Amino acid sequence: MNGMDLSWIAGASAAVAAIAVACAVAVRARHLRVVRRHSSALTELRGVNVEYAARLRYLPPVEYHALATVSSKPKVDRYDLRRFMLRRLALQEEQIRTSVDERLDDWAWYLDYCTLVEKVGDEHLGTSTTDELGAGTFARVERREFAKQKLTAPTCSVHLRCEVVHRRRWPRRAYGRSLDWSLDDLVQALDAVRRTRLTGIAHGGR
């Protein structure tokens, strides 16, 4: 067998493989079209998606960065980062609290959505059939498509950091410390800021 024969066989094998892949893709596409036409679960899910897509806003994470500069390395080591962050948050308390509340509301809507979608799945998945497709294939494709069509979860997070640094002129480098807070840390901090403000108001009114 010469090189030309081997080349022809390799080319024929590649063509057969490509045809097999194309046929498999076409079969999967046909299965999906059949399931989408006849699945009551997917029909119900589309209705739920339309309703909740109008409510979910998919807001970006809350981002806040506070920076303090001090004149020496010992001051960096002694610096109270938590107190510094609380003071900075107090300057924008309402704005930051509104941003957090908006994202928590978004997450609450998504939890409601997940509960409703679970109910739709329990009541409708596996109940639809058609003569165009075997029951096992229909159920398998339906479950896979049901999972794919669910709305994605909104972001409910914060990127919150406060830093204190000492920048030396020579050699040119900085020494510092930082504190990163999670969403729970931020909510607790905002509550602490509000308590401090209300206490100050109460004392001032006496």
Image (cartoon, rainbow, N blue to C red):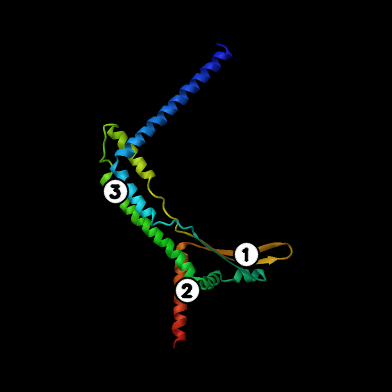
Q: Secondary structure at mark 2?
A: helix
Residue type at mark 1 is Gly
- Quickly name the residue at label 3: 120
Compared with residue 41, is residue 12 higher up or lower down, i.e. above or below? above
Above or below, comparing residue 92 to residue 151 in the picture: below
Identify the mark nearer the N-term, 3 or 2. 3
Vertical order, 103 against 48 (above or below) = below
Left or right: where 103 falls relative to 129:
right
The residue lying toward the viewer, choosing from 172 and 195, is 195
Residue at far bottom of view? 206
Quadrant of the drawing holding the C terminus? bottom left
The answer to whether the residues at label 2 and label 1 have Cβ atoms under 8 Å apart is no
The secondary element bearing badge 3 is classed as helix
Foreground of the two, 152 or 57:
57
Answer with mark 3 or mark 1, whichever residue precedes in sequence: 3
Measured from the top left, where is residue 146 in percent x and y? 35, 43
Image position of 76 (left or right of 149): right
What is the x, y in percent for residue 69? 64, 69
Q: Quadrant of residue 77?
A: bottom right
In the picture, the disc for residue 108 is none
Q: Which residue is mark 2?
A: 193
Residue where numbered disc 1 is placed: 176
Whole-number angstrom distance, CA of label 2 to CA of label 1: 25 Å
